[in-house]
Image: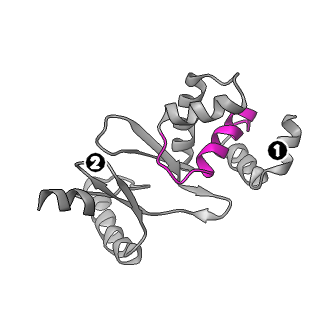
Amino acid sequence: MQGHFYRRNRGSGWWQGQFKGCGYRFTFPRRLILDVLSSSSMHLSAEDVYLEVHKKYPGVGLATVYRTLELLVQMGVVSKSDFGDGRARYEMNKGPEGQRHHHHLVCSNCGLVIDYADFIDEEAKLLKKVERGLSEKYKFEINSHLMQFYGLCEKCKGKKD
C-alpha cells in the first residue's frame, strides 16, 4: 500500500530529495502531511492537518504532525503564519513546481486572509534593499521574511460605513 501511494503521487521524488538533502528520512506520515498541505488552498492549523491525515492513516498522532510541520518550516518547504487568532497556520512555501512566494491581507474583523502576489516584483526590490541594510547594520543573516497587511475586507468595511 505505501509503495503504491508513493508511486502515484507527483513530486514524491522531489520531496524525497529535499528530505535526503537535509539529512532526514522521507517517511509515509511526512508524505501524507505534505499531500494535505500541497492539495489545500487554505492556511491550515496543525489540528486541521491532523484531521485530514487521520482520515487516511489513523496511526499518525498529533505530536507527529506538530514535529513534522516544524521540520518542514525549518527546511523552508512550509511557511508558518499567525493571523492574530492565536493559532499557527501552515502553507506550502515551495514544491516540485517551484517557489510559491506571496503575501497576505488579513481582515482584523472577520479573519479573512487573502493571498496576493500583485506587486511582488516591486516589493522584492524594496525588501532586498531593506534586508541588505538590516543585515549590514546588525550583522544578521536574513533568510526569509513574512509580510502581512491588516485592515478590513470589503464586507466588513461595508458594515462599518
Q: Quadrant of the N terminus?
A: top right
Residue appearing at x 39%, y 55% in the figure: 142
Instruction: Specify the amino acid type for callout 1.
Output: Tyr
Which numbered disc, 1 or 2, marks the residue closer to the eye?
2
| In magenta segment, residue 30 | yes
Instruction: Specify the amino acid type for callout 2.
Output: Cys
Q: At which x and y percent is residue 127? A: 33, 68
**For mark 2, what is the residue?**
110
Q: How is the image coloured?
A: one colour
Q: At which x and y percent is residue 134? A: 27, 60
Residue appearing at x 86%, y 48% in the figure: 7
Which residues fall within the magenta stretch?
24-44
**For mark 1, what is the residue?**
6
Q: Nearer the viewer, residue 43 or 146?
A: 43
Residue appearing at x 26%, y 63% in the figure: 154
Left/right placement of residue 115 relative to residue 73 reads left
Q: Quadrant of residue 14?
A: bottom right
Q: At which x and y percent is residue 114? A: 38, 59
Q: Earlier in the sequence, mark 1 or mark 2?
A: 1
Left/right placement of residue 130 relative to residue 42 reads left
Q: Is residue 111 above or below residue 67?
A: below
Q: Residues within 10 Å of mark 2 (few under 14, many from 20)?
A: few
| In magenta segment, residue 32 | yes
Q: Quadrant of residue 131?
A: bottom left
Cα–Cα gap, marks 1 and 2: 39 Å
Q: Quadrant of the C terminus?
A: bottom left
Q: Disc number at residue 72?
A: none
Residue appearing at x 47%, y 37% in the figure: 45
